[in-house]
Image: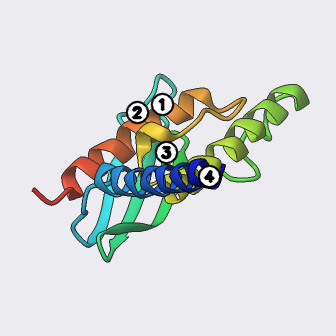
Amino acid sequence: MNKTKHIITKIAAVAVVLLMLVSCAAQPKLADGEYVKASAPDSHGGWAEVKITVSGGKITDCQFLMFESGGILKDENYGSSLPAELFDKAQTALKGSQEYPKQLLARGNANDISAVTGATESMKVFKELATQIIDEATEK
């Protein structure tokens, strides 16, 4: 029984080392700097911007800014001129979209970002812009 336990322990240790190697290899080394990408305007004239800071080859800061037409930053007043139900929906989407930078910082990969209820469309924009930045920053 002790021999079996010893073998299982060794197999588990090897598996952990392999997982660590795979996760390190999955994240490319990025060139240090500050990167910004903006989306094309949507049908209402609004757009989004992703700002990523890379330091030590890793993403250290990320911001996702969304603008209404005319360059007005979407904030706690976004949608306030709409009926209450639509205002709540606009704020839910805005708050949900602020989870995407946090996910990118935690996971280091735009493909691993999960949708937040109410902010699915902004997730698509965020992932596209973050992927463009990561591709640009990837050391070749």
Residue sitting at x 15%, y 60%: 139
Residue 2 in percent (x, y) is at 64, 55
Mark 1 or mark 4: name the one nearer the start of the chain. Answer: 4
Mark 3 or mark 1: name the one nearer the start of the chain. Answer: 3
Most extreme residue toward the left, as rendered?
140
Q: CA distance from mark 4 to mark 2?
A: 61 Å
Q: CA distance from mark 3 to mark 2?
A: 11 Å
Return the residue at label 3. 70
Q: Amino acid at mark 3?
A: Gly
SS at mark 3 in the image: loop
Q: Nearer the viewer, mark 2 or mark 1?
A: 1
Residue 30 in percent (x, y) is at 25, 63
SS at mark 4 in the image: helix
Q: Residues within 10 Å of mark 2 (few under 14, many from 20)?
A: few
Return the residue at label 1. 124
Q: Residues within 10 Å of mark 1 (few under 14, many from 20)?
A: few
Q: CA distance from mark 3 to mark 1?
A: 22 Å
Most extreme residue toward the bottom, as rendered?
56
Numbered circle sitting on residue 5: 4
Q: Amino acid at mark 2?
A: Pro
Q: Relative to the observer, which residue lies in front, 80 or 38?
A: 38
Residue sitting at x 42%, y 54%: 14
SS at mark 2 in the image: loop
Numbered circle sitting on residue 41: 2
SS at mark 1 in the image: helix
Q: Would residue 92 appear left or right of 8 to someone viewing this image? A: right
Q: Is residue 64 at all visible to an observer of this figure?
A: no
Residue 20 in percent (x, y) is at 41, 57
Q: Amino acid at mark 4?
A: Lys
Quick one: quadrant of the C terminus?
bottom left
Placement of 23 over or under 110, stated as above or below:
below
Q: Nearer the viewer, mark 3 or mark 2?
A: 2
